[in-house]
Amino acid sequence: TTPSSDGLVGYHAVEMCEKAKLSAEKNKRIYF
């Protein structure tokens, strides 16, 4: 893969992680 596509995948992975963290904060009893 090209560095640009790797960067894009990494960006989306971080974005998904942040969304997961926000969801976890709202539903701690489910995730933790």
Image (tube, grey):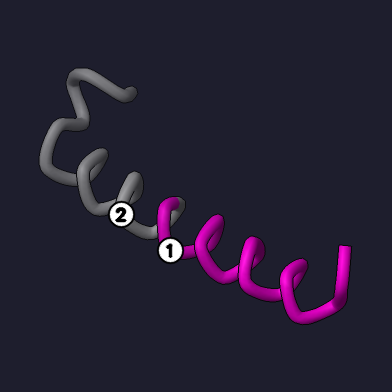
Task: Tell me the quadrant of the picture where the N terminus can be found.
Answer: bottom right
Q: Main secondary structure of the magenta part?
A: helix
Magenta residue check for 10: yes
Task: Tell me the quadrant of the picture where the C terminus can be found.
Answer: top left
Distance CA(mark 1)–CA(mark 2): 6 Å
Say whether marks 1 and 2 touch (CB < 8 Å). Answer: yes
> Which secondary structure lies at badge 1?
helix
- Left or right, 21 with respect to 15, comes to left
Residue holding disc 2: 19
Crowd class of label 1 (few under 14; some 14 to 19; many from 20; radius 10 Å) = few
| Identity of the residue furthest to the bottom in this view | 4
- Left or right, 8 with respect to 15, comes to right
> Which secondary structure lies at badge 2?
helix
As displayed, is residue 23 above or below residue 13? above
The residue lying toward the viewer, choosing from 24 and 2, is 2
Residue 13 x %, y %: 55, 56
The residue lying toward the viewer, choosing from 12 and 27, is 12
Give the residue type that dot 2 points to: Lys
Give the residue type that dot 1 points to: Glu
Residue 16 x %, y %: 41, 53
* Residue at horizontal 45 percent and vertical 52 percent from the top: 17
| Identity of the residue furthest to the top in this view | 30
Residue holding disc 1: 15
- Left or right, 23 with respect to 21, comes to left
Region of the chain picked out in magenta, as a range: 1-16
Residue 7 x %, y %: 71, 75
As displayed, is residue 7 above or below residue 1? below
* Residue at horizontal 43 percent and vertical 63 percent from the top: 15
* Residue at horizontal 76 percent and vertical 80 percent from the top: 4
* Residue at horizontal 62 percent and vertical 72 percent from the top: 8
